[in-house]
Image: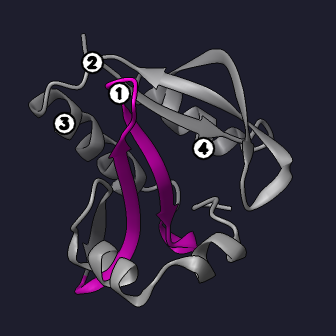
Amino acid sequence: MAFGVSHASAVAYTDDAWRDRAAGRGPARYLLAFQDGAAVGIVAHVPNARQALELIAMWVAPPLRGTPVASQLVAAVQAYAVANGYPRVLLGVAPDNARAAALYQKQGFTFLPEWETLESHPHIQLQKMEWTPK
């Protein structure tokens, strides 16, 4: 659920599309967090049609949840938004994912009265959150 893409959508990507994603070509950007040479977290962002930056994927290795890794990944997206002139960062969070919502709120995100369906799990509704630079 961290990435929200359905299996059907992922299978439809061509090999070239996967290579482009892995090489950082295209609109989405993926940032990895490393500890002792091992990848321990990832965050991704992509611009949307409304001139905002969307945080579209977030994952931290279970043993490192609750450490600064997640907040550092989110902060990197926020810094990218500021450096590139995006007026806000948006994301969706499942209402039962209180830990993630608390992390985003600590990073300055607020809930919006907007909901969207998670593509990979249509029974899950995500509430939108927004961060704007001060």
Q: Are marks 1 and 2 in contact (CB under 8 Å)?
A: yes
Mark nearest the camera among 3 and 1 is 1
Mark 3 neighbour class, 10 Å CA radius: few under 14, some 14 to 19, many 20 or more: some
**In the orientation shown, which residue stands out farthest toward the top?**
134
Give me the disc on residue 100: 4
Secondary structure beneath disc 2?
A: loop
State which tag comes first along the sequence, 4 or 1: 1
Which residue position holds label 1?
A: 52
Residue 71 is covered by the magenta coloring: no
Name the kind of residue labelled 4 in the image: Ala
Residue range in magenta is 36-64
Secondary structure beneath disc 4?
A: helix
Q: Is 36 or 88 nearer to us in this picture?
A: 88
Mark 1 neighbour class, 10 Å CA radius: few under 14, some 14 to 19, many 20 or more: some
Give me the disc on residue 87: 2
- Compute the Cα span from label 3 to label 2: 12 Å
- Compute the Cα span from label 2 to label 4: 22 Å
Q: Note whether residue 109 is visible.
A: no
State which tag comes first along the sequence, 3 or 1: 1
Mark 2 neighbour class, 10 Å CA radius: few under 14, some 14 to 19, many 20 or more: some
Name the kind of residue labelled 2 in the image: Pro
Position of 5 relative to 118 (above/below) = below
Residue at 46 percent of width and 30 percent of height: 90
Residue 133 coordinates in the image, percent (x, y): 26, 17
- In the picture, residue 74 is in which quadrant? top left
Give me the disc on residue 79: 3
